[in-house]
Image (tube, rainbow, N blue to C red):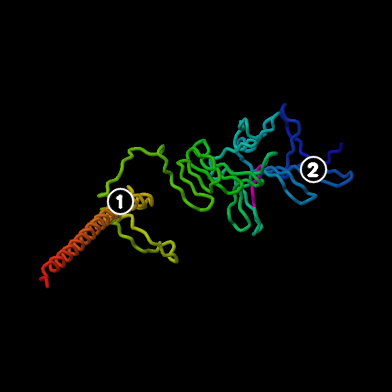
Amino acid sequence: MAIIVGVLSAGQCSAAESVVLDGPNPHVTFDDNDGTLQMWEVFGDDTGFDIIDPTAGTSPFHIDKATPDNSLFIKGVTGQIGIGTAVPDAVSRLDIRSSLLNGLFMRREDAGQGHFMRIETPSGTFRSGVQGTGDAQFGALTAGKGLNLLAGGSTKLLMNSTGQITFGNSPTPIGAHALVHDSGARLSAAGVWQSVSSREAKQDIEPITIEQARDTVRALQPVGYRYKKELDEHYLGFIAEDVPELVATNDRKSLAPMDISAVLTKVVQDQDRQLQDQSRLLQDQGKQLTEERQRNDKLERSVTSLMQRLTDLEQQRLGNSVPAK
């Protein structure tokens, strides 16, 4: 081993010190001149501490002076890394502690390229980052794998690999539907919204009266309109603030189509009942007219028969009254 020192300054050393380099630019050079040439320098001055690669002309490692305690801590045996802590989390490979806004900052300098964080297991790959277009990307990168979003310590949204979604406080199985809420409401694979309507989900069930339904239908004001955020499409419907109380929501900002369908159904059912009553009445009247017509026909035949008999009797009387010759 050879030690070559350009300027060597020997100072006093404490018992715990082995080597002290003292001077304006103290550094140690490691020069490998066997085979592939490579040189390293360890350098320290009043600006900080560096590990320099003179062969490549780079300084890959630098520590500023007055750097806080435990800025970088590597735990023995396990090799866990703590940044800002000497007690890294026991189940984490890297533990970052900070009072700054961002605990981790990643940036790619060349424009138009994606930049991602990628986490893998033998079963699947997760990727999160920014695409080259600037759009964010987050989710399962492995074919056939889905996405599980947590909130409040438990799953609140599940998306499978085909894009079907179930969500809510306790998401239910997706099944064949495109979108499922834990209330039971769902969007079918064909794009049809199906509201929850099971008796199990309801209470205070009571029929509405025909008077309520009629009054509500009479008070409804169908209108045409365009949404301010979709001016190129024309719609027909109702204004939530203007509908009768029976079909209004608490905030009067939205409507439940099933409410309006219910009152319309009640009115249609009543009209159908009235039509059936009128039909039965007409049938009864028709039957009565038929019976009356039959009685009239019978009476007419009786009168005709009686008239014929009277005619016959009159002829017979006239025949008997002719004088004998």
Viewer-side residue, 162 vs 307:
307
The residue indicated by pointer 2 is 29
Viewer-side residue, 86 vs 184:
184
Q: Quadrant of the N terminus?
A: top right
**x 81%, y 45%: residue:** 39
The residue indicated by pointer 1 is 273
Q: Report x, y in % for residue 105.
A: 60, 47
Q: Is residue 216 above or below residue 90?
A: below
Quick check: is 186 in the magenta stretch? Answer: no
On the rendered structure, is 133 left or right of 282?
A: right
For residue 89, which quarter of the picture?
top right
Q: Quadrant of the C terminus?
A: bottom left
Assess whether mark 2 and mark 1 are in contact (beta carbons under 8 angstroms): no
- The residue segment tinted magenta is 115-119
**x 43%, y 61%: residue:** 229
On the rendered structure, is 46 left or right of 233?
A: right
- Secondary structure of residue under mark 2: strand
Viewer-side residue, 199 vs 73:
199
State whether residue 80 appears in this view: yes
Q: Residue placed farthest to the bottom in the image?
A: 325
Q: Report x, y in % for residue 36.
A: 87, 47
Q: Nearer the viewer, mark 1 or mark 2?
A: 1
Viewer-side residue, 112 vs 239:
239
Give the amino acid at mark 2. Answer: Thr
On the rendered structure, is 227 left or right of 243?
A: right
Q: Report x, y in % for residue 300.
A: 21, 62
The disc label shown at residue 144, or none: none
Give the amino acid at mark 1. Answer: Arg
Q: Is residue 41 above or below residue 14?
A: below
